[in-house]
Image: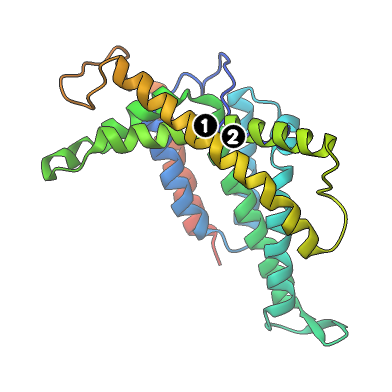
Amino acid sequence: MMEKLIIGRYLPADSVVHGMDPRAKLLFIFIFVLIIFLANNPVTYTLLGAFTLFAVFLSKVKLRFLVNGLKPVLILILFTFLLHVFFTKEGDMIARIGFLTIYEGGVIKGVFISLRFFLLIFVTSLLTLTTPPISVTDGIESLFGPLRKIKVPVHELALMMSISLRFIPTLLDETDKIMKAQMARGADFSSGSIPDRVKAVIPLLIPLFVSAFKRAEELAVAMEARGYKGSEGRTKYRLLHWSLRDTMAMLLLGALSAALFMLRS
């Protein structure tokens, strides 16, 4: 399961989305997160789904790869759906399971919220899959550059976010190795009661934290050995260029926003 998780991974390819300016992709994600809340009926959600599939097509990332990578998140989406189904008391009652009642409004809201959550993860995953971590850092630093005037350490914050994204797959791989090593010594993570499973995970967390702190220390020593001093006196090897495709993407997103606003209930 952890090997299929796509959060933080980058897939090099020659596509329209890969060639976009990282600033355009970051703005795109930010605006998409805002306008997705305009959807509140089947028509608007269908439009959002079609737009998301079009973005996946332009990125040349296989849809099956994306779906398989999001399987670990499906448990959270299913949990969100069930919460709305059993605890939202709107509309007509359609079923009763013991002391729990299911209402029509709860099912509809659960479906819509789950779709919204799924589309958000889908689109935000495209950012890391089509953008190298160093480009994400450059894009964040450029977008938040004006905050330097009020003494905000923009470069350091962008670097921290980039390193965090970069080390997500590394820590997942490390977790998988530790789990396999402990399973080979008789540890059981898949059977027993919930308290037993929680107790089995505790010995997994200790070596994982030790490994994470060790990697962080090695990275800090390596950066100091290479003379890293933050943004002071640094120049850019990779220059960002806003192109026509970035403008077209923003215009297309603006058209989607207008359509969602007009078609919402």
Residue 243 visible, this angle: no
Left or right position of 243 against 227: right
* SS for callout 1: helix
Q: Is 187 left or right of 238, judged from the image as shown?
A: right
Cα separation, mark 1 vs mark 2, equals 6 Å
Dot label at residue 171: 2
Is 261 above or below relative to 133?
below
User: Measuring 63% from the left and 22% from the top, which residue is drawn there?
Assistant: 60
Mark 2 Cα within 10 Å, few/some/many (few <14, many 20+)?
some
Give the image quarter of residue 149.
Answer: top left
Mark 2 secondary-structure assignment: helix
Residue at the location (48% across, 25% down)? 131
Tally the numbered discs. 2
Q: Position of residue 37 (x, y in %)?
A: 50, 59
Please give the name of the residue rendered at 72% of the width and 30% of the height, measured from the top-left corner. 65
- Which is nearer the eye, 64 or 247? 64
Extreme residue in the front direction: 185
- For the residues labelled 1 and 2, say whether their Cβ atoms are less than 8 Å apart: yes
User: Where residue 89 sits: x, y (%)?
Assistant: 68, 83
Q: Residues within 10 Å of mark 1 (few under 14, many from 20)?
A: some
Q: Is residue 90 above or below residue 240?
A: below
Q: Callout 1, which amino acid? A: Phe
Q: Determine which of the numbered discs, if any, sits on residue 167 in the image.
A: 1
Q: In which image quadrant can residue 141 be found?
A: top left
Q: Where's the N terminus, which quadrant?
A: top right
264, 202: nearer the viewer: 202
Q: Amino acid under label 2?
A: Leu
